Image: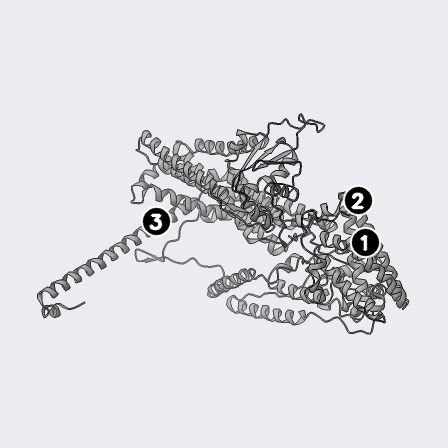
Amino acid sequence: MRSPEALALLPPSVASARRVSVNVDSAGNRTLRLLGLVAVRELRLTWLLFAKEVRELLVSRALWSMVLISAPLVGFSFIQAVRMYSQSSSNAFRLPQLLPNVNPLDGIIIPTFGAVYLMNTFLLPFVAIRAIGNEKQTGALKIALQLPIGMNRLVGLKLAALAVGWCIALAPTLSALAIWALLLGGHLSVPELLTVLLGHALYAFVIAGVAFLAAAITESSATAAIVALSFTLGSWILEFAGSTGSGFLRAVASFSLSPALRGLERGLLGSPTALTLLVLGLGFVALSVVWLPPGVSRRQKLVRSGAVFGVAAQALLLVIQLPIFADVSENQRNSFNPADMRELRQMTKELKVNVNLAANDSRLADLDRNILSKLPRAMPHVTITYAETSTTSLFGGTSGANYGLTTYTYGGKQGVTRATTAREVLPLIEALDGRVVTPDPTTAYPGYPLVTSADAASVWFYALLPLLAVGGWWYSQRVPRLPTAVAGVPVARSATRLPWLSPYLPGVRRTALAVGGVFVAIQLIPYGRSHTNFAVAPPSAGPVLGVTDRYCPRTFAPGAESTMSLGAFRTQVTGMLGDLDSAQQALAANDALTLRAQYSQLAVAYAGVSKELAELYPVRCPRLLADRLDGDAVILVPATVNLTAAAAPIAALRAGLSGISTELSSRIQQASPDALVGNSAQTIDAPLVTGTPAWDGDRTSALAARTCAACHSNQPGWSWYANVAPVSWLVQHDVDAGRAVLNFSEWDRSQPAAAQLVASVQQGRMPPAYAGVVNSDLQLSDSERAELVSGFQTTFGRGARADAASVPASGSAILVATLGTLVAALGFALGRSGGLRILTASPSRTPRISARRMMQ
């Protein structure tokens, strides 16, 4: 910018242009500064009003009553969910085909959030109504409207303050999930958890909008509560009527609140779920803004309400038709196989589905879960109709000859079936368009079984959390602090009862906050969270990689499934076990000819069931194939049998086939011996135990499970504190090192360190002495140590030697010493800050696992 003296030296035309530019720049700067001041003023006013709304919410009894009631509700739901989850996990350990059904989303997250659903439905309306009803009755609303904020911002601030209160009421639920993930070692999928949380937040948003509207159109809070509860109960009744009815009633019931929430709870993030709740909530809040202002005629309010209804209806119809879906569930429960999804999207004609099942028939629920709910998301045009059928009678009879049939019509062609699974229905639909689809290989969902107990958490939910709620209400009732000086008169500080402690209090407070923040932060480190259960992976090296695709294919073309029955398959596996037993006897007698002959019979029998093994056990097949190749290399290929090297592959093969035989027996009990392998292959092979040693007796098995399974199995069973960092880091390090050396749960692969077990136990190196200091279960008396040594020698026979080197230690002693040094330093720092003494103890581990659980 030029000075006036410089402008005077310029020509008149140029000087005039410069003055105009300077004036424009000055005006623009003043405008920007003015706009900045206005924005700061508006933000400050908004913040003050928001703080006032939050303060009024915190001093109310309604909020803390909601927290007080929700704490035991969440606790009861969570403890019962963990108990049932443990029962399902125990069944899954006995029947590995049930492992994919052990899902934390269904078993833990949804039941725990069930208490949140009740809180949102019955308790949240009272808290929301208070935010508007009290101001209407006292006349404070008219005073608030005199401020330059507007009705939209006022309602938005009340809604934001209510969101703060809802987050406070959500503390019991979040603490339950923290107990599950951190203390009990359970699995949580973050996308699934966030989707469920989003669903309940949107549901709470709709309920809050209904409560605001009820408070806006009524004159008293009691009447508003009745109106709000009538809406929520009416939604429940509509959903129940839709589940038991058909036709128009079923179609209307699909617009209730619960179906949209259920979609989000199942991990489906899509336009008919999240956006539906969002539009409904915005519509109710907009109606509240219309009806809340006093002094507006009812006619104007009705006209504006009609406009809101029209916009909301158009938006609702739009979001329902938007084909936007995201399946965030870990097991992809809301989608078909990717190959089927690609083919179905290309079928652009209309698919008509006619269902001839009664509403209370369990087959309709299976059909809807497996097929009907997924088809509209997979195909562009799907029309589903429900035939008018009578309900099933007392003895299971029905009134129609076609009852149970589902008709699929596409492009003038028709297919009829009674099947309710995607494996049978999708090929029928695709065949109507002349398509044959080979499913893509997908990663099997392993399931996350966990046998544990949350009964100890009852103290937290039934006693401590209610006390904290009462304490929060009492603390919020305190008189606000005055500044250190009022009108120039200093305010005297209250004298403490311990004057010697006053100088240390600021340092203690800062140190405690820093230590607490670091402790919470290290809990988010993923390392140390996977030692509860382990998944079995196929071999990652060796010659098996070149032939896996040939002998262990992951998918089979439709119609190429095995036609062998489960009973015949088990007979073949039993015969192979007999061949292996004879081979082990020949190996013990150093009879090379008999060993080769028996192993040759095993190879022939194995070739006869290789297809069934690959189809029914896709995870175990590569592992068995690797053992087969190792056995062939030392028994069949060379001219002279290598007796020393033959022991390991024979023992591994026997362990793997023995586990398959046990699983087949359980599968046959569920189905029948005549069931075909091809029809049973839809169950997922996700074992945690693929083979166990042939223990010489129950005593050896029990001692090994008590003292060795903590670090040498796929089901360690650590106690709750083993999931709290930094102890969890030490446990993870020990378990990883122990399983890398020896694993009792995967005896179907070679275990070279088995020969060193006797020496390790006999010399007292295993179990480690430092672990038995805290946990008495890891201590062995002299007689128990002698029993375990004798059992190992008998079990492992030729491979067990007392003069072998010990099993390599995991190095926890160094880590424990390091942790002890850090804890000691932390205690010294705290002592310097606040004169406090901290009693430190070496971190310990407490493996709790029974012999029966490890050997299943």
Say which mark, if any, is on residue 673: 2
- In which quadrant will I find the N terminus? bottom left
Say which mark, if any, is on residue 573: 1
Which residue is at the front of the view, 134 or 177?
177
**For the point 39% across and 34% down, which residue is it?**
309
Percent x, y of residue 184:
64, 54
- Looking at this rendering, what residue extends furthest in the top direction? 399
Which comes sooner in the sequence, label 1 or label 2? Answer: 1
Q: Quadrant of residue 620?
A: bottom right
For the residue marked with disc 3, what is the amino acid?
Thr
| Up/down of 175 relative to 429, above or below | below
Which residue is at the front of the view, 24 or 726?
24
Q: Mark 3 points at which residue?
A: 46
Crowd rating for badge 3 (residues with CA inside 10 Å; few <14, some 14–19, many 20+): some
Which residue is at the front of the view, 163 or 63?
163
Percent x, y of residue 361:
65, 33
Query: Is there CB contact under 8 Å for labels 1 and 2?
Result: no
For the residue marked with disc 1, what is the amino acid?
Val
